[in-house]
Amino acid sequence: MTIKQKAGLKNYIALARPDNWVKNIFMVPGMMFALSVFKTPITSHLFFKIIIGIISTCLVASANYVINEYLDADFDKFHPLKKNRSSVVYTINPKLVYFEYFLLGILGLSLAYLISYKFLILSALLLFMGVIYNVRPFRSKERMFLDVLSESVNNPIRFGLGWFIFSPALGAPTSKWDFDWINTFPPSSIIIAYWMGGAFLMATKRFAEYRLIGNPEVAGQYRRSFKFYTENSLLVSMFFYAITCAFFMGIFLIKDRIELLVSFPFFALLFSWYLRIGLLNDSPVQGTEKLHTRKWFMLYLFLFTTLLCILMFIDIPWLHWFLKNATNY
């Protein structure tokens, strides 16, 4: 039996996965949409809120990663790639893990408090969803379909965090008929579309992991939900999430920002391209650090994001005319 070495400072930092902070880029669309809606003045205070908000979200996300890696150590050893993680290779001190978890969580929530109450509540929800996803008796990651939905819900949470950095921080309602505070929330259609889009990405990742392991029995040892999945069920779920995302995205585009209708074919190409990458053997979609190797896809993603930013801040009059006056579409 091999005796594991004790984990050092570098290994405890690795538990927080700072390389995964790039996922907080999902906050940016929320910022951009809120900026286009509220016309938030660009001031030094706003830049301060953006920096503090991003740091806060990174810390809260890292707290979730810490508890995830520690509680998943006995399962990750069955994964061809994750078996090399610090929590598997080294002996981890549980007291230090929980200290790191609470330290990151408290620091993240303390910074969130500086933004607004709504930002703080969403940050706490992000931390809570980490508990639901990883900790028994909940541990939603072990349940078929719920594992994808409960992890991908972090995407609309991140969208909301970006949104609330720019949205007006209204106080408590002055009366029971005061509903102005509702107008500071993002549209429900974009939240559901964002959630389902994230679910598509996550289901594609699950599909790639399932194919990489190549053995249903071993896959079930690594992730309990894999005992109930098949390649076909994962593929069908991917299509369901993609179609649902497109449906609610269409509602949002028609109701809230008709100019973004121009981007719809590019959305379709993005999802199709990502699916193609997901179907590769040892697919890069299993981790953000591998997805960066797909240079043409990353270039397309950059150009697509640029297009979205442009469409959010320009008006296309003929699209508005078409929406109001055309009767044969």
Image (cartoon, rainbow, N blue to C red):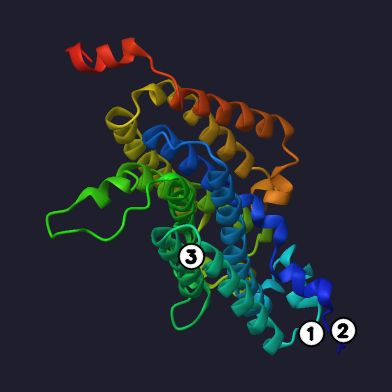
Q: Is 119 rendered above or below residue 86?
A: above
* Residue under label 1: 91
Q: Considering only vertical position in the picture, is 184 above or below 136?
A: above
The residue sitting at 45% across, 44% down in the picture is 166
Q: In which quarter of the image is residue 243?
A: top left
Give the percent coordinates (x, y) of residue 224.
Answer: 53, 73
**Nearer-the-camera pick, 227 or 182:** 182
Q: In this view, does 240 lie above or below 295?
A: below
Do residues under tags 2 and 1 come within 8 Å of each other at their CB atoms? yes
Quickly name the residue at label 2: 5
Q: Which residue type carries mark 3?
A: Tyr
Q: Quadrant of residue 217?
A: bottom right
Q: Give the CA separation, mark 2 to mark 1.
A: 6 Å
Mark 1 is on which residue type? Answer: Thr
Circle 3 packing at 10 Å, graded few (<14), some (14-19), many (20+), is some
Q: Relative to 194, is 84 on the left or the right?
A: right
**Amino acid type at image mark 2:** Gln
Which of the pair 122/168 is nearer the observer? 168
Q: In which quarter of the image is the C terminus?
A: top left
**Mark 3 → mark 1, Cα distance in angstroms:** 35 Å
Which circle marks residue 113 in the picture? 3
Q: From this viewpoint, which residue is outermost toward the front?
A: 44
At horizontal 76% and vertical 70% (from top left) the residue drawn is 13
Tell me where residue 179 appears, x and y as whole percent: 19, 51
Left or right: 252, with 81 as reference point:
left
